[in-house]
Image (cartoon, rainbow, N blue to C red):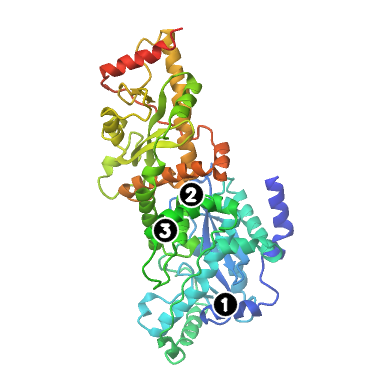
């Protein structure tokens, strides 16, 4: 179906839809209104579209970022349509080579123009031609008119290409990573551009898409390249200088006037659209309002100077980052804020939630009777009040003490410990230990271990936790029996232990990681990573309490989604009381 539809759309609609307007007068006027550069008919940009590792010629598709991709070239208009596209080149090709091999280059070199003397704007990756203008080299940047010209070029070109590609990738998420053969990838890219232009013309959907994205696609500028292989200057320097002269001191004297600073319009998080809000932030609007009442005072500003982010915007930005798992740069471009602002929002929100809500939300129920009953119904083991598990959360390579965070899988991570209930809530969470630490060591240094050893119990009648073989055998912590495995009652006990503990911890952690995608790879410092984990656990329990609809969808999607690392054998000591308690449990299965 995909091959047939893509081929049909490209054969029948592409040439008609992806082209310059018949009359480019309005295009030129809109571009000139952006930065003051005249006769601009398009903004040129190269974009790398990631693909799966191809079966053949892998090195041809390896781009400068070390990923396999195809190198596509587009020309965007001020209406965020695409006027031209070339998508046949592998990722190893540089942008200038892609341009020089394109039909656009051939036609423009032969004298064709969408309007007489029309020009395209490109970045420093492209050669300078009479019809293709790029920024002036920084060697001449001390000249005021050069500064004005370069600034005008950036104000004209960059927002157009970033927003056009952002809308495209937001509308067609397949373009974030094409999992098809490299030969189909270019055709699929052309098809998506055709559909993009069609919906911009005929479909009201784009109004919503435009509101939701702002500079969503990050464009990578290349260093200045030597284009000596292009024979003939084609009067490119003369044309560039002609445009620069339009920005001389006299004609731009009013640039010295102090103007009121302009701020980007804040993104609409679709707070009134419950489905979109749940998809983006993983929490319902009602729960967000309740949360704001509790933590809003920690997020407020003492002044409105410099247009600070509101308390709600800070919370929604942080929830979006945690729910989507994007980088802060991607979130900043999507939300029209700087990366540093996103980082400050995240730190403030995480700290506020952990300080105010963590102890209240992440705890055992006041009455554990139903918890014990639900656990016993799973496998028949009595008096169980929780399932204990350690989980490794991947982080980026830290700047210091790298070896401390290298776990047994060879990845950098933090070691977190949780206690889960049959309702998939978390009753306890401890996070932030380096990945090299053993589960047993993390357990013994936890506040849970100290409290239980001192006699505290969530259930008055000698309640127990279930753990795997990585943990010691204690009177209140029961692990599988590792000896006398040929005895039937031991086999029955071990099976019951696994049926009770494993589904609970796997599904609880699966829901957590599916709901808060940032936990699949935390791109922050290790110390802050532990705080984020605790914050996500708190929000997870909070949404369980409020019965947010988002939970139902995620639970349906995952089933044992998280693979728990098998515990490795170690010489754990067995407390005498723990052995007796384990034997008592085993004897339940004697008959």
Front residue of 39/577: it is: 577
Residue 569: image x %, image y %?
Answer: 32, 22
Task: Check residue 79 in the rendering and tell me which mark sits there, or answer none.
Answer: none
Earlier residue among tags 1 and 3:
1
Residue at 60 percent of width and 70 percent of height: 77
Element under disc 2: helix
Q: Residues within 10 Å of mark 3 (few under 14, many from 20)?
A: some
Question: Disc 2 vs disc 3: which is toward the camera?
Answer: 3
Q: Residues within 10 Å of mark 2 (few under 14, many from 20)?
A: many
Residue 500: image x %, image y %?
Answer: 46, 24
- Residue hosting label 2: 323
Cα–Cα span, label 2 and label 3 = 20 Å
Cα–Cα span, label 1 and label 3 = 42 Å
Cα–Cα span, label 1 and label 2 = 37 Å
- Residue hosting label 1: 31
Element under disc 1: helix
Labels 1 and 2 touching (C-beta < 8 A):
no
Earlier residue among tags 2 and 3:
3
Q: In which quarter of the image is the N terminus?
A: top right
Front residue of 291/117: it is: 291
Question: Disc 1 vs disc 2: which is toward the camera?
Answer: 2
Q: Is residue 416 left or right of residue 279?
A: left
Q: Relative to 93, say whether 258 is above or below.
A: below
Task: Check residue 296 in the rendering and tell me which mark sits there, or answer none.
Answer: 3
């Amino acid at each position: 179906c995909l091959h047939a539809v893509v081929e049909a759309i490209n054969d029948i609609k592409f040439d008609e839809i992806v082209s310059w307007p018949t009359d480019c007068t309005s295009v030129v006027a809109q571009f000139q209104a952006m930065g003051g550069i005249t006769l601009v008919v398009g903004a040129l940009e190269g974009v790398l579209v990631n693909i799966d590792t191809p079966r053949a010629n892998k090195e041809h598709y390896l781009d400068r970022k070390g990923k396999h991709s195809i190198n596509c070239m587009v020309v965007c208009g001020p209406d965020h349509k695409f006027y031209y596209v070339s998508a046949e080149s592998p990722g190893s090709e540089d942008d200038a080579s892609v341009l020089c091999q394109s039909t656009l280059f051939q036609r423009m070199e032969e004298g064709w123009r969408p309007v007489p003397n029309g020009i395209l704007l490109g970045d420093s990756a492209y050669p300078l031609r009479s019809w293709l203008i790029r920024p002036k080299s920084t060697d001449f940047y001390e000249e005021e008119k050069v500064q004005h010209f370069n600034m005008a070029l950036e104000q004209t070109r960059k927002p157009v290409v970033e927003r056009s590609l952002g809308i495209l990738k937001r509308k067609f998420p397949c373009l974030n990573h094409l999992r098809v053969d490299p030969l189909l990838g270019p055709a699929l890219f052309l098809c998506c551009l055709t559909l993009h232009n069609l919906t911009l013309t005929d479909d009201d959907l784009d109004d919503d898409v435009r509101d939701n994205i702002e500079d969503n696609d990050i464009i990578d500028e290349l260093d200045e390249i030597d284009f000596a292989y292009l024979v003939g200057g084609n009067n490119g320097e003369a044309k560039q200088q002609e445009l620069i002269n339009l920005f001389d001191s006299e004609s731009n004297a009013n640039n010295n006037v102090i103007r009121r600073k302009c701020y980007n319009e804040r993104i609409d998080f679709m707070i009134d659209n419950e489905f979109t809000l749940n998809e983006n932030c993983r929490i319902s609007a009602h729960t967000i309002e309740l949360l704001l009442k509790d933590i809003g005072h920690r997020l407020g500003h003492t002044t409105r100077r410099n247009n600070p982010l509101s308390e709600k915007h800070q919370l929604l930005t942080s929830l979006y980052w945690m729910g989507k798992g994007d980088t802060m740069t991607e979130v900043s471009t999507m939300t029209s804020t700087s990366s540093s602002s996103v980082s400050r929002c995240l730190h403030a929100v995480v700290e506020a939630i952990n300080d105010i809500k963590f102890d209240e939300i992440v705890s055992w129920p006041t009455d554990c009777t139903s918890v014990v009953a639900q656990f016993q119904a799973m496998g028949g083991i009595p008096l169980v009040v929780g399932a204990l598990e350690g989980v490794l959360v991947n982080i980026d390579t830290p700047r210091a003490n790298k070896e401390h965070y290298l776990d047994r899988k060879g990845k950098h991570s933090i070691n977190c410990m949780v206690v889960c209930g049959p309702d998939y809530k978390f009753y306890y969470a401890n996070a932030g230990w380096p990945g090299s630490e053993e589960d047993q060591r993390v357990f013994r240094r936890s506040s849970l271990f100290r409290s239980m050893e001192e006699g505290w119990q969530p259930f008055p009648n000698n309640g127990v936790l279930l753990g795997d073989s990585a943990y010691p055998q204690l009177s209140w912590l029961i692990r599988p029996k590792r000896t006398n495995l040929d005895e039937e009652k031991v086999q029955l006990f071990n099976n019951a232990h696994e049926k009770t503990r494993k589904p609970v911890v796997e599904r609880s952690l699966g829901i957590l990681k599916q709901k808060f995608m940032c936990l699949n790879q935390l791109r922050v410092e290790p110390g802050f990573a532990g705080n984020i984990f605790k914050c996500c656990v708190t929000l997870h329990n909070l949404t369980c309490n409020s019965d947010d609809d988002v939970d139902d969808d995620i639970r349906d999607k995952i089933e044992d989604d998280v693979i728990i690392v098998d515990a490795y054998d170690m010489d754990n000591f067995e407390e005498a009381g723990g052995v007796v308690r384990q034997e008592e449990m085993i004897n339940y299965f004697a008959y």
